[in-house]
Image: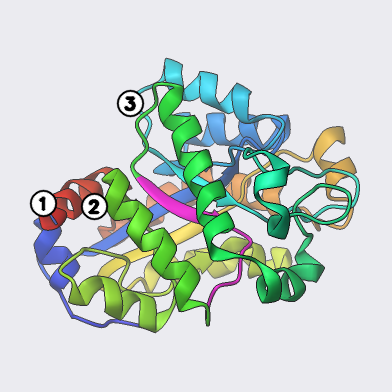
């Protein structure tokens, strides 16, 4: 558990220092129709606070149209340079000849298992070019994102990559999801509000007892700002073909988000659900 500058984010966002704040974000918007449909539904009738868009993916246009039709829904850009499945892959929005260090011999992003190889040879200027291209594609569609985060990229010890993301967030007037103690310290020391604790990645939890785990974590949620990165999806033929070994992780996340049980606990515990719009406002104030 990480709480660097106790109460700073709460104060910056206008809440008492003992308030328990929670952002529940749906990652992977645009990945496939099953995921899009689950996110649509959870945003409309569940606890979901916001989502983040995977610009390079096949169903990103579908997700973009939804966001254009529902400008009240807060969303971020899910910076994507990893493509993890053998039979369902994607590549850069930038011309491939401009970002050769981001792609494998087949022209796709590296898969999850080859991430160490990818990180060892990726050029930061090309990585920034692709990140920038994904942000610009969202802006060109007339959409107004609130924040940046990233898809599957393990950057715990890569402060250089984090610094690229932080610089882009400031440049584009966006907030940034932060991972790890060093990142939280860096952001909060500059006066920006951020999650006070390392964000929860729902894909790392055992789906067998996820409901009980989420229940317990809600009841034990600490003061300050927490963020949970959920990965909702519907177990239809499409999703099961993409993730045959997914162990129903995405369906379980969706079921929890729309459950009455979860809604009741949030109400009973007095948890305040937020999204990145409030953080974006303060990030811009601090940067100006």
Does the magenta portion include 157?
A: no
Name the spot of residue 193 as percent of width and height, x first.
Answer: 22, 63
Which of the marked residues, 2 or 3, is nearer the chain's N terminus? 3
Image: magenta residue range: 147-156
Residue 230 lies in quadrant: bottom right
User: Mark 2, residues whose alpha carbon is within 10 Å: few (<14), some, or many (≥20)?
Assistant: many
The relative height of residue 188 versus residue 94 in the rendered view (above or below) is: below
Q: Are marks 1 and 2 in contact (CB under 8 Å)?
A: no
Residue appearing at x 71%, y 63% in the figure: 207
Does the magenta portion include 154?
A: yes
Please indicate whether residue 266 sits to the left or right of residue 65 in the image.
left
What whole-number distance in Å separates the C-alpha atoms at marks 1 and 2? 14 Å
| Residue annotated with mark 3 | 72
Which of the marked residues, 3 or 1, is nearer the chain's N terminus? 3
What whole-number distance in Å separates the C-alpha atoms at marks 3 and 1? 25 Å
| Residue annotated with mark 1 | 288
Residue appearing at x 18%, y 80% in the figure: 6
Residue 57 lies in quadrant: top right
Out of 137 and 260, give the one closest to the viewer: 137
Out of 277 and 61, give the one closest to the viewer: 61
Mark 2: secondary structure = helix
| Residue annotated with mark 2 | 279
Name the spot of residue 33 as percent of width and height, x first.
Answer: 71, 29
User: Mark 1, residues whose alpha carbon is within 10 Å: few (<14), some, or many (≥20)?
Assistant: few
């Amino acid at each position: 558990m990480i709480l660097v500058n106790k109460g700073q984010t709460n104060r910056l966002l206008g809440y008492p220092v003992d308030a328990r704040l929670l952002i529940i974000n749906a990652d992977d918007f645009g990945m496939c129709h099953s995921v899009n449909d689950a996110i649509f539904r959870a945003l409309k009738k569940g606890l979901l606070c916001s989502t983040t868009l995977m610009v390079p993916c096949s169903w990103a246009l579908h997700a973009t149209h939804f966001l254009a039709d529902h400008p009240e829904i807060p969303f971020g850009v899910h910076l994507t340079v990893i493509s993890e499945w053998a039979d369902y892959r994607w590549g850069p929005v930038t011309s491939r000849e401009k970002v050769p260090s981001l792609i494998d011999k087949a022209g796709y992003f590296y898969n999850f298992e080859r991430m160490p190889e990818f990180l060892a040879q990726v050029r930061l200027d090309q990585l920034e070019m692709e990140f920038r291209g994904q942000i610009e594609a969202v802006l060109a569609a007339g959409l107004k994102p609130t924040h940046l985060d990233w898809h599957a990229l393990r950057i715990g010890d890569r402060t250089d990559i984090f610094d690229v993301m932080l610089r882009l967030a400031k440049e584009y007037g966006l907030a940034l999801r932060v991972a790890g103690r060093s990142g939280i310290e860096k952001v909060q020391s500059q006066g920006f509000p951020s999650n006070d604790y390392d964000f929860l990645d729902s894909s790392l939890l055992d789906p067998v007892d996820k409901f009980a785990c989420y229940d317990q974590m809600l009841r034990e949620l600490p003061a300050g700002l927490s963020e949970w990165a959920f990965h909702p999806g519907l177990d239809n033929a499409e999703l099961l073909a993409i993730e045959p070994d997914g162990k129903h992780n995405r369906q379980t996340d969706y079921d929890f988000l729309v459950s009455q049980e979860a809604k009741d606990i949030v109400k009973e515990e007095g948890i305040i659900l937020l999204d990145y719009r409030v953080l974006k406002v303060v990030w811009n104030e601090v940067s100006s």
